[in-house]
Amino acid sequence: MSRRKLAIVTGASSGIGLELAKLAAHDGYDLIVAADEPLVDASAALKNLGVDVQSVEADLATDQGVKQLLLAAGDRPIDVLVANAGQGHGGAFVDQDPEDWKHTIGTNITGTLLLIQPVLRQMLRRDEGRVLVTGSIAGYIPGSFNAVYNGTKAFIDNFCAAISDEIKDCRVTITVLKPGATDTGFFRRADMLDTKVGQMDKDDPADVAKTGWDAMLKGERSVVHGLMNKATVLAAGLAPESLTARKHRAQAEPGSADE
């Protein structure tokens, strides 16, 4: 009798994470879904998909939160890890509370690595498994008025490329999904609704999730969602950082939605 497959999805209360959890369920994976807020949306959306769903409310910026999530898996092999949890804070860096930007770094970088490392070790022992990490095209752009967030995504994009190379001779894969502005709660939580990027039309999180899920199943190392975002990445690689920072400022500066 074959065992049931297991997927862990973080940042699964809404947005891209919730849509990735749905895709995993449709493909027959039992789910452990995690977020740092009550999983009201996820619980309702996932309960009738024919798989077991376990919800974990934990702060994945902390060692304890990551341990809590891993303990939920018990002795079950983890077939897929979707490291999607992330956060950011808009506004000028000098005006931000250090506790806020430290929590962003803890969630986006430290907690992500604390989760990925033990799961990868387990997968490599079995020589089987897939990891999908949500990076961002923001990692290519100096993020004026969202500087810490963009910096963390630059780290994640670079980190995933490095780990992909380290494990290239194994049957375990790590894929980084790089979306652009997506219609999620990110901009509300980041206090960026008064910015141009906060008010602009955004990508559908279901479409973004499908792009990432399909790339993960194919074992691709990275994928940028959408033609416009691919063009943005290409342009960022050619333009000086002073120009890309200025363009980001025009989109992310507080009050820019009124200009």
Image (cartoon, helix red, strand yellow):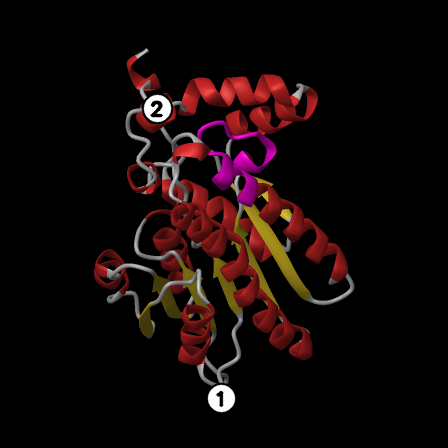
Above or below: residue 127 compared with residue 9: below
Marks 1 and 2 sit apart, C-alpha to C-alpha, by 57 Å
- The residue at the point 34 percent across, 72 percent down is 51
Task: Tell me which segment is drawn in magenta.
Answer: 138-152
Neighbourhood count class around disc 1 (C-alpha, 10 Å): few under 14, some 14–19, many 20 upward: few
**Of helix, strand and loop, which mostly describes the magenta segment?**
helix
Q: Give whichever of discs 1 and 2 has the lower sequence position.
A: 1
| Element type at mark 1 | loop
Q: Residue furthest top?
A: 259
Residue 92 x, y percent position in the rendering: 42, 30
Above or below: residue 157 compared with residue 140: below
Q: Is residue 149 magenta?
A: yes
Above or below: residue 111 compared with residue 148: below
Amino acid at circle 2: Pro
Amino acid at circle 1: Met
In the rendered structure, the answer to whether residue 240 lies left or right of residue 249 reads right
- The residue at the point 49 percent across, 27 percent down is 144
Residue 202 x, y percent position in the rendering: 37, 30
- The residue at the point 64 percent across, 52 percent down is 160
Which of 167 and 194 lies nearest the eye of the viewer? 194
Residue 95 x, y percent position in the rendering: 39, 34
| Residue at numbered disc 1 | 1
Neighbourhood count class around disc 2 (C-alpha, 10 Å): few under 14, some 14–19, many 20 upward: many
Identify the mark at residue 254; answer none if there is no mark.
2
